[in-house]
Amino acid sequence: MNLFPRFSRNLLPFVVVLATFLAFSPAVMAEDAPDVYEYPFNGSFTEFSLRGGPVLDLGEVGTPFTLDAGFRNSFPFYLGDHRISYRFTTAAGAEPSAQIHSLHAALALHPLYLALLSRGIFSHFLASLHLELGFGPQLGLVAAHGEQSSQSGFGFAGSVGAGFDVPLTNANAGQALWLNFLYRRTWTTVSFEGEGFGEGLHDHGFFLGLGWRINGTIWRD
């Protein structure tokens, strides 16, 4: 199966939205404005986020879409972070149609975290670049199609990914709105019999989202 046409067609809206956010976000336009040092961003944070985007290579079930909601907390000094999330993936309208419900625990490492010592949106971008490893259970459901009956399957999934985050409002004001982008490759033990699922339910996911980030550790006064 040639993934490139599907890749370019489904990722183009993501690229346009991402470029618009970066070009017109308040954090970029007010980069030289005085910071409000109530709780300046030093790499420690708690974040609640919602992400979504296209999924590729999910068997032969069309062009699925995925949504992801999670809680994220960083280690001191932006060296790494961990995130717990619920993910829902659907291929509604395809034949056969499928749904996947996932719980996902991820550990991310920021190799360029020291870039946060500089100022500006580019420093935030560099410091936020991260590699992610994840694991969690999945429940898959497939609706009846033709002579095939409904199916369900339970298993576990592992993933690797990479992403970045940039602030859309003043990151040093104690709390801020951040843009999240993540690519994730997922392998799963969930599989179904029948047409469309011969290669399993492994996928490439592209996530664009918004996160509300509160500076400091969760134990701060």
Image (cartoon, helix red, strand yellow):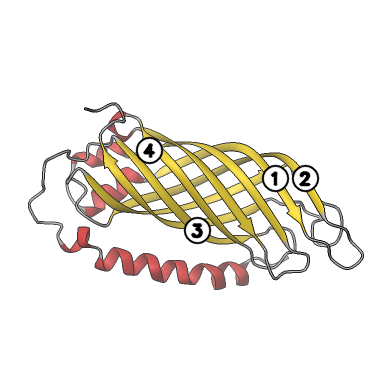
Secondary element at tag 1: strand
What residue is shown with label 1?
Answer: 139
Q: Residue type at mark 4?
A: His
Quarter occupied by residue 142: bottom right
What residue is shown with label 4?
Answer: 110
Query: Where's residue 48, x and y in %?
Result: 39, 45
What residue is shown with label 3?
Answer: 52
Q: Residue at x 64, y 67 (%)?
A: 63
Above or below 42: residue 161: below
Q: Tell me the crowding category of disc 3: few under 14, some 14 to 19, or many 20 or more residues within 10 angstroms, Cα based.
A: many
What residue is shown with label 2?
Answer: 153
How far apart are the alpha carbons under marks 2 and 3? 23 Å
How far apart are the alpha carbons under marks 2 and 4? 35 Å
Query: Where's residue 163, x and y in %?
Result: 43, 49
Q: In front: mark 4 or mark 1?
A: 1
**Image position of 116 (left or right of 189):** left
Which of the pair 108/191 is nearer the observer? 191
How far apart are the alpha carbons under marks 1 and 3? 19 Å
Query: Where's residue 61, x and y in %?
Result: 73, 64
